[in-house]
Image (cartoon, helix red, strand yellow):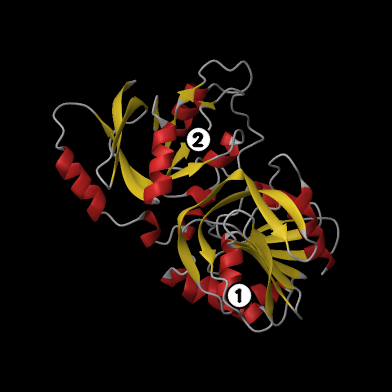
Amino acid sequence: MNDTILALEDGSIFEGRGLFVGGEVFGEVVFNTSMSGYEEAFTDPSYAGQILIMTYPLIGNYGFHKKHPESDRTQIRGLVVKEPYFFSTRGTRFAKYLEGKHLPCLYGVDTRALTLKIRDRGTMKGSFIPMTGKIDMAAIIDRIKCSPYPDFGNLVAGVSCRNIIVHKHRNSRRIVLVDCGVKKSILDNLKRHATVFQVPFDTDYESIDEIRPDGIVISNGPGNPEHPQILSTTVVTAQRLIEKYPIFGICLGHQILSIALGFKTYKMKFGHRGSNHGVKDLRKGRIYITSQNHGYAITDKSVPGVEISWVNVNDQTVEGIRHKKLPISSVQFHPEAGPGPYDTRFLFREFLDA
């Protein structure tokens, strides 16, 4: 344990104690408002490139368990918490988990003040800095300012599978899952009902068409949906698939499918990350509580033949779209997640019925 700070690009400094911070750790600083589910958050590929603040003060109190991770490794670059719980009686304890995963952590931080700073200023770049020896803080801030945001690069390429993976099922139904950084829980939901062909994000139309799937799912993932490498691969493939197959998009997959249909995207001030986001199904007039993790959203402009089907009840951002004639739909939230209710899992059944 050593004294460590979090420095933000606006010059703000937050002091705390460091765990396994061996050097400078750079990332986009974001916050998650969940009271539980920290294991899932740390391993969610959508967090690639980010330093995560957990707003709930006590983290680690029910330990860490092998069945909960959403991927095979931690995806966040660093973790910020108010009060780690070092002595859980179940599962792996907090410090041992961090050490085993080589995950740098800053704790003892005023996470309320830090979260308010992000909400007011918007998402910022930041770095963990171990306070060892003489520190040139002005040079550190300049370095943070000059460094590009992590999503300047193609983060999806780092979390997508490299080759086609086949998850066999006893029935004949076949689903192609375009892996942009898929969560294990999405894959598990699909594997219950069909043979799943998990393909890399840049798989071309011809390779998918050879599989002869009954439907396509475009997964969640990190980064900018309008990154040039995404536009030239995943979006182009989605455009060619639209007229031929039922398609369902989740989170980043929702944004990619929306772009393919004619929508534009924008970077939100601080995004939606947590398990308590209310959304409204405009077809039924019902409100659902959902789990979300995204920093981009689609615009609410009108696109011929497509309707906005879900909206966020807090800020009215678009949470889902549906094609008026074709079996194509997508949602910004995570229907596979269980943030308390399991209400929106019916969306998988609707897709499978299509």
Provide residue 124's location: percent of width, then percent of height: 35, 49
Provide residue 178's location: percent of width, then percent of height: 62, 64
Q: Quadrant of the N terminus?
A: top left
Provide residue 85's location: percent of width, then percent of height: 52, 20
From where the camera sits, is residue 224 visible? no
Residue at x 40% of width, y 29% of height: 110
From where the camera sits, is residue 192 visible? yes
Q: Which residue is mark 2?
A: 55
Q: Is residue 27 above or below residue 247?
A: above
Amino acid bearing label 2: Thr
- Marks 1 and 2, how far apart at CA: 36 Å
Provide residue 67's location: percent of width, then percent of height: 67, 35
Image label count: 2
Q: Quadrant of the C terminus?
A: bottom right
Q: Is residue 288 above or below residue 135?
A: below
Q: Quadrant of residue 320?
A: bottom right
Q: Is residue 227 above or below residue 10?
A: below
Q: Which disc is residue 204 wearing? A: none
Q: Which disc is residue 238 wearing? A: 1
Q: Which element carries disc 2, helix, strand or loop? A: loop
The mark nearer the N terminus, 1 or 2, is 2
